[in-house]
């Protein structure tokens, strides 16, 4: 019986080929839109995640316990005392690629004529190589341990001062004890991150010089930053570090990129909602398309419905016939949409479309579209479910037809 | 009484806008098992309404109809569908085959409703198509068959489930007279060979002459 209804459904779907093709095309474009946009959104998530990790945050950061909460107000109260020993321990953990340390400082920077506020980081130059993916040196050279007095500036800060590599600057800052201290430095390079707020204010300087100007011990740092071989290993490495902290009784707290990458979460939230709206629009489109097709099919086949009812088919049999037809249309549309979506995703990624810079950035980017299994499943499931739901009402109406009137229908 | 069909004081009125139309007016009629009965009358006389009521496609406004002893009007729509599947066969003026199914599949349809096994179905469909002389057209779809051939398939479909009664509403009206004659001869032969009761409507005098009995109806009343 079910076999009969399925056979009828399949053959009836192909009865009015043009109409079926138009309906399928609409469904396929809807499903493909979900796949392409979902793939685009996922590529953006990935891009923002990796660029955040590789441009500053790293995969994991360690601080003295309490730093995350109160470190802003009293940075010198939450220093890690013996960085070299900790570094050696961390380097022994699996999946850890780079371990480096940072020390924040802020104050005034002056050319002699002009003075402005800056925010800076004392860094280990060699340790930052893999963490500066987006801070590209556009003029001069990057920091190196061989040039302890060198600094690199964000392009906005350099432009505001009109300085170039080789120029001298003076940094004024406050030591641990609260005294004013000055440091003469030389501009070694100018970099651009694409992040305007960062490029306009930020400078980098070697860690030993930073410790000296802040009047700190040589092993004292604010944060230890780890880069792993792959983002997927973050949770495992975090667990290993927490085990190490417990075993050694270390006074440290651990944060991962997931805790620190605020912007990543904002982007996910925003695009997640846009994606939700798109999904809703496509669902509505599919529901209307199928309802329309099924309603027309039922009108055209009224006498056939009367006939099968006269032959003793019960109402639920008529419902089954039309719902199966809807499901079959849904499956066809979903498969066509999945194929179209994957082809479009690959094609758009291959062609390489350049998009303008997003808000807060100065750099445009190439459109990348991932083929994400979860998005494919979502698009396919949505098409099938929407088509099934959309066929329920027309099927119910067909089953409610009066047999005598249906048989008389021309 | 072992009447196959018993129609007892049946009336049927329709509401057409504000006007009440009396399609059938106090009709009583018995059809014995094995009968070959023609219901004759001009169009609009109530022939189709009477056949629809006997076939359980519609319910009378008053009166009672029994098929093989079973009261039809008391049954729910679903129970009437089951009764049709078990005891009745239908032949329509416009053949009403399902165009997406082959002749074989159209004939098989009632057996699928009966949930017969596939071996049983194969034997019965084959026998029914042979009886109507269309064994060689089994895999053609209705649009590839002539009107007469389509009506033969419809007769095979009506008979395949071995019903007590076959109802045929103007089965020859859409056929030329020679083909119509063939169809009536076929029905007559099946009636004789298999003892199936036939009740059919017609307004063609030549077709009526083949019947055991002609029931004339006009303006909703028997004459």
Image (spheres, helix red, strand yellow):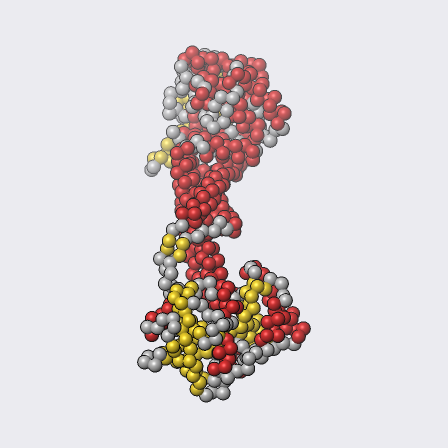
Would you place residue A178 above or below residue B108 in this image?
below
Across and down, in percent, residue B106 comes to 51, 25
Where residue B206 appears, x then y in whole percent? 42, 12
Can residue B72 be seen in the rendering of this structure? no
Observer-nearest of B22 and A10? A10
Task: State whether residue B8 is above or below residue A222.
Answer: above
Seen from this angle, which residue lies furthest right? A247
Q: How many marks?
A: 0
Can you give x and y, in whole percent of width and height, for residue B19 in the image? 34, 35
Residue placed most toward the observer, B129 or A249:
A249
Image position, residue B61 (x, y; %): 45, 34
Q: Is residue A223 left or right of residue A108?
A: right
Which residue is found at the position 61% from the left and 73% from the top? Answer: A86
Residue A398: quarter of image: top left
- Foreground of the two, B181 or A246: A246
Query: Which quadrant holds the N terminus of chain B?
Result: top right
Residue A162 is at least partly visible in this image? yes
Q: Quadrant of the C terminus of chain B?
A: top left
Q: Residue at x 50, y 72 (%)?
A: A145
Closer to the camera in the image, A46 or A16? A46
Q: At 57% across and 78% down in the image, what residue appears?
A: A219
Residue depicted at x 40% and y 50%: A352
């Amino acid at each position: 019986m079910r076999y009969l209804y399925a056979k009828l459904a399949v053959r009836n779907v192909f009865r009015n080929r043009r109409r079926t093709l138009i309906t399928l095309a609409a469904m396929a474009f809807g499903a493909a839109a979900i796949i392409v946009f979902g793939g685009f959104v996922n590529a953006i998530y990935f891009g923002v995640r990796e660029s955040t990790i590789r441009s500053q945050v790293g995969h994991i950061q360690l601080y003295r316990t309490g730093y995350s909460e109160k470190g802003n107000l009293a940075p010198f109260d939450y220093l890690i005392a013996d960085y070299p020993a900790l570094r050696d321990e961390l380097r022994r953990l699996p999946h850890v690629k780079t371990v480096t340390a940072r020390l924040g400082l802020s104050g005034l920077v002056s050319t002699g004529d002009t003075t402005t506020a800056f925010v800076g980081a004392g860094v280990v130059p060699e340790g930052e190589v893999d963490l500066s993916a987006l801070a590209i040196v556009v003029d001069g050279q990057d920091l190196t341990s061989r040039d302890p007095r060198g600094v690199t500036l964000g392009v906005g800060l350099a432009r505001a001062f009109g300085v170039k590599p080789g120029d001298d600057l003076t940094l004024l800052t406050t030591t641990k004890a609260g005294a004013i201290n000055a440091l003469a430095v030389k501009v070694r390079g100018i970099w651009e991150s694409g992040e305007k707020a960062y490029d306009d204010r930020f400078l980098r300087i070697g860690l030993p010089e930073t410790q000296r100007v802040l009047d700190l011990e040589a092993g004292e740092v604010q944060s230890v930053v780890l880069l792993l071989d792959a983002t997927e290993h973050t949770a495992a490495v975090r667990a290993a570090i927490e085990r190490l902290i417990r075993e050694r009784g270390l006074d440290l707290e651990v944060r991962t990129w997931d805790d620190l990458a605020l912007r990543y979460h904002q982007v996910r939230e925003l695009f997640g909602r846009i994606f939700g709206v798109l999904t809703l629009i496509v669902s509505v489109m599919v529901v209307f398309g199928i309802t329309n097709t099924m309603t027309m099919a039922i009108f055209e086949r009224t006498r056939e419905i009367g006939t099968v009812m006269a032959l003793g088919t019960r109402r639920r049999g008529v419902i089954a016939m039309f719902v199966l037809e809807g499901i079959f249309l849904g499956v066809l549309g979903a498969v066509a949409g999945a194929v179209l979506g994957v082809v479009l995703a690959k094609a758009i990624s291959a062609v390489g479309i350049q998009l303008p810079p997003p808000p807060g950035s100065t750099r445009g980017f190439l459109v990348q579209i991932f083929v994400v299994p979860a998005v494919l499943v979502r698009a396919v499931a949505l098409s099938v479910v929407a088509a099934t739901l959309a066929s329920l009402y027309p099927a119910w109406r067909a089953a409610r037809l009066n047999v005598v009137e249906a048989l008389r229908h021309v | 009484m072992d009447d196959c069909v018993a129609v007892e004081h049946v009336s049927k009125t329709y509401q057409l806008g504000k006007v009440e139309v009396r399609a059938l007016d106090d009709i009583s009629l018995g059809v014995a098992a094995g009968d070959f009965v023609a219901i004759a009358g001009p169009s609009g006389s109530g022939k189709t309404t009477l056949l629809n009521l006997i076939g359980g496609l519609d319910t009378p406004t008053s009166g009672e109809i029994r098929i093989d002893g079973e009261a039809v009007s008391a049954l729910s729509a679903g129970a009437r569908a089951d009764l049709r599947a078990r005891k009745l066969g239908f032949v329509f003026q416009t053949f009403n085959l399902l165009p997406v199914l082959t002749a074989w599949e159209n004939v098989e349809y009632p057996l699928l409703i009966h949930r017969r096994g596939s071996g049983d179905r194969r034997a019965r469909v084959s026998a029914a198509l042979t009886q109507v002389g269309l064994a060689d057209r089994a895999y053609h779809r209705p649009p590839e068959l002539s009107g007469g051939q389509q009506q033969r398939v419809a007769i095979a479909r009506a008979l395949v489930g071995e019903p007590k009664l076959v109802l045929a509403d103007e089965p020859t009206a859409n056929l030329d007279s020679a083909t119509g004659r063939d169809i009536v001869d076929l029905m007559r032969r099946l009636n004789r060979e298999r003892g199936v009761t036939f009740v059919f409507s017609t307004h063609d005098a030549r077709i009526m002459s083949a019947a055991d009995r002609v029931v004339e109806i006009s303006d909703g009343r028997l004459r």
